[in-house]
Image (cartoon, grey):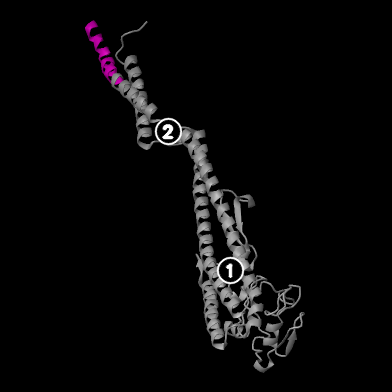
């Protein structure tokens, strides 16, 4: 049976409790509407907060992975652009060399050809020496990527392990200077432990170079088809024992070559020019192979970027379902608690007047 008391007003206490709950619910709804998050602190949803924090770390990691892949694409673009120029220059050098091999050019014409070839060779070497990306020398063979044979690793995922890395092969970053490219068809021994036939730069495996050998070493050289070459009267031996600046064993070497000397040796007559065509063909093939490899890597990296985007999108969606506030629901909750707050306040005022009824009994 309810009684009328002055010191304890149960009705008022009940109204106060409900008013406090309504006010708390309204404040929570207001916080969620203003922040857009259902979880604003651990007390809102301890388990959900923990899961959301881990997901946000993954999302941030995927953003970095996308940036890494974009940097890798830029690096490959830079290398490919220079190799395209090198390829164009090599093709022009080959055209000029094939002209010189025709045997219809006099000394003045050969000198003109030699001058253009020399300048194009010098420009190839200059380009490959100066091109770099973010401090990494791309095409002079001196970068750690080339000398260590480890290449460059692109981190394209959140986790550790080789499955989260795309390795750009070191051969892309080996020296593409003219002097390095021309020696790709030769083998050497006694250099950095490499075994094989010890050939000078002007000798080619599987290809006769008797004219060049005669021109450089002096004396008479005879090819397998009986052709004899004797340049003793014009002897040119200045580069007989000089190595190219070559990087096919991935170790830095001093540039001892002299493009002027090379051109003087090659553009002597049609025979030496003809033999030099195989050198240029090897150089063109080397550049072509690198360009193809770069293109393949670019496709692979772009695929990795697409995969990263899909993964990130899925995690963002999952995190949203856990952490984001439903505006429609929170708006309804806000209105509900606002009404409850107002009604509780009105009823509390009424409940506070209840003890005054006791005065009528005195």
Q: Is residue 34 left or right of residue 281?
A: left
Residue shown at 53% from the left, 64% from the top:
79
Determine if the magenta segment contains residue 301: no
Depth check, front residue: 152 or 206: 206
Residue shown at 63% from the left, 69% from the top:
147
Marker disc for residue 38? 2
Residue positioned most to the front: 104
Depth check, front residue: 194 or 80: 80
Question: Residue 334 location, x and y as percent?
Answer: 34, 26
Residue shown at 31% from the left, 11% from the top:
5
Label 1 CA crowd tier, 10 Å (few <14, some 14–19, many 20+) = many
Q: Is residue 220 left or right of residue 350?
A: right
Marker disc for residue 286? none
Q: Is residue 87 left or right of residue 45?
A: right
Depth check, front residue: 271 or 300: 271
Which comes sooner in the sequence, label 1 or label 2?
A: 2
Pick the quarter of the image with the N terminus.
top left
State if disc 2 and disc 1 touch (CB < 8 Å).
no
* 51 up-or-down from 201: above or below: above
Label 2 CA crowd tier, 10 Å (few <14, some 14–19, many 20+) = many
Question: Residue 320 location, x and y as percent?
Answer: 46, 36
Circle 1 residue:
143
Question: Is residue 159 among what the camera can see?
Answer: yes
Depth check, front residue: 277 or 322: 277
Q: Secondary structure at mark 1?
A: loop
Pick the quarter of the image with the C terminus.
top left
Give the tally of numbered discs: 2
**What predominant SS class does the magenta segment belong to?**
helix
> What is the quadrant of residue 200 in the picture?
bottom right
What residue span does the magenta drawing correspond to? 344-362
* 38 up-or-down from 191: above or below: above
């Amino acid at each position: 049976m309810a009684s009328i008391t002055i010191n304890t007003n149960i009705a008022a206490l009940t109204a106060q409790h409900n008013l406090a709950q309504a006010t708390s619910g309204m404040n929570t709804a207001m916080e969620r509407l203003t922040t857009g998050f259902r979880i604003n602190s651990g007390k809102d949803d301890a388990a959900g907060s923990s899961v959301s924090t881990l997901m946000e770390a993954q999302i941030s990691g995927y953003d970095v992975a996308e940036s890494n892949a974009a940097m890798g694409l830029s690096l490959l673009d830079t290398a490919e652009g220079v190799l395209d120029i090198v390829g164009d220059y090599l093709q022009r050098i080959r055209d000029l060399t094939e002209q010189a091999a025709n045997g219809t050019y006099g000394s003045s014409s050969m000198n003109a050809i030699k001058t253009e070839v020399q300048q194009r060779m010098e420009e190839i070497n200059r380009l490959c020496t100066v091109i770099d990306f973010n401090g990494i020398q791309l095409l002079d063979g001196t970068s750690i990527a080339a000398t260590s044979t480890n290449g460059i690793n692109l981190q394209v995922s959140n986790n550790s392990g080789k499955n989260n890395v795309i390795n750009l092969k070191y051969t892309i970053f080996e020296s593409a200077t003219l002097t390095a490219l021309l020696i790709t068809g030769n083998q050497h021994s006694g250099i950095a432990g490499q075994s094989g036939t010890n050939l000078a730069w002007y000798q080619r495996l599987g290809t006769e170079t008797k004219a060049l050998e005669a021109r450089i070493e002096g004396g008479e050289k005879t090819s397998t088809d009986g052709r004899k070459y004797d340049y003793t009267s014009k002897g040119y031996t200045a580069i007989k024992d000089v190595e190219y600046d070559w990087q096919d064993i991935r170790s830095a070497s001093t540039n001892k070559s002299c493009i002027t000397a090379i051109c003087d040796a090659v553009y002597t007559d049609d025979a030496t020019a003809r033999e030099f065509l195989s050198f240029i063909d090897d150089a063109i093939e080397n550049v072509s192979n690198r360009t193809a490899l770069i293109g393949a890597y670019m496709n692979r990296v772009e695929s990795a970027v697409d995969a990263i985007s899909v993964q990130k999108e899925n995690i963002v969606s999952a995190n949203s379902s856990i952490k984001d506030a439903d505006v429609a629901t929170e708006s309804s909750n806000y209105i509900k608690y606002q009404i409850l707050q107002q009604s509780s306040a009105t009823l509390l005022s009424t409940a506070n007047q209840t003890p005054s009824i006791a005065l009528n009994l005195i």
